Image (spheres, helix red, strand yellow):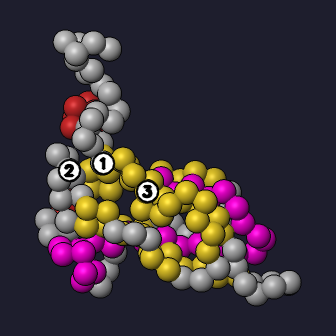
Amino acid sequence: MGADEKCHFCYNARGMIDTFLVPEKTVVNAKGDGPMVDVSGAANRVFLLSLNITGIVEQESLDVSIYGSADGATWGAKPVTNFPQKFYHAQHPLLLDVNGYPDAKFLRAHWEVSRWGRGSETPMFEFNVTIKEVPNDILKEATAEAKAMV
């Protein structure tokens, strides 16, 4: 695409947030936190999150929550959102609108793991969580389509 051409529905135009809340190939066997991501510069405060579970053992669960912070040091007592509890390999998308959390300038993922049954009691998950800013034009189009369906 040339410099004079306009990308009407580019998913992730230059400068938009597109990164990891939990890095690729992260292997965990206990609760923990991912790195914080600065979302204060986002043009649109709606994000597509994706929990990608790539490795597991049987009879275990993974709970992933997303927390917000105004300063990157003090995190809210309650998450801004969470993925439903997961047990299997899969990709799980989730739309996060942080407009209702105006003080949330930073986001980070927190996870808890559990294992039951036979064998080792130590859980093991390999997963990542991505965060992508949703462009405003795509959000407007999807909202209009959803309203038309009602």
Span of residues in magenta: 49-76
**How many marks on residues?**
3
Please identify the quadrant where the N terminus is shown: top left
Q: Disc 1 residue type?
A: Ile
| Residue at figure coordinates x 48%, y 63% from the top left | 22
The residue identified by callout 1 is 17
Q: Nearer the viewer, residue 132 or 46?
A: 132
What's the CA distance linking mark 1 and mark 2?
A: 7 Å
- Which comes before the other along the chain, label 3 or label 2? 3
The residue identified by callout 3 is 20
Mark 2, secondary structure of its residue: loop
Q: Does the stretch in magenta take in 4?
A: no
Kindly indicate the quadrant of the structure image that contains residue 29.
bottom right
Is residue 53 toward the left or the right of residue 47 in the image?
A: right
Mark 3, secondary structure of its residue: strand
What's the CA distance linking mark 1 and mark 3?
A: 10 Å
The residue identified by callout 2 is 42
| Residue at figure coordinates x 17%, y 46% from the top left | 43
The answer to whether marks 1 and 2 mark residues whose Cβ atoms lie closer than 8 Å is yes
- Few, some or many residues within 10 Å of mark 2 (<14, 14–19, 20+): some
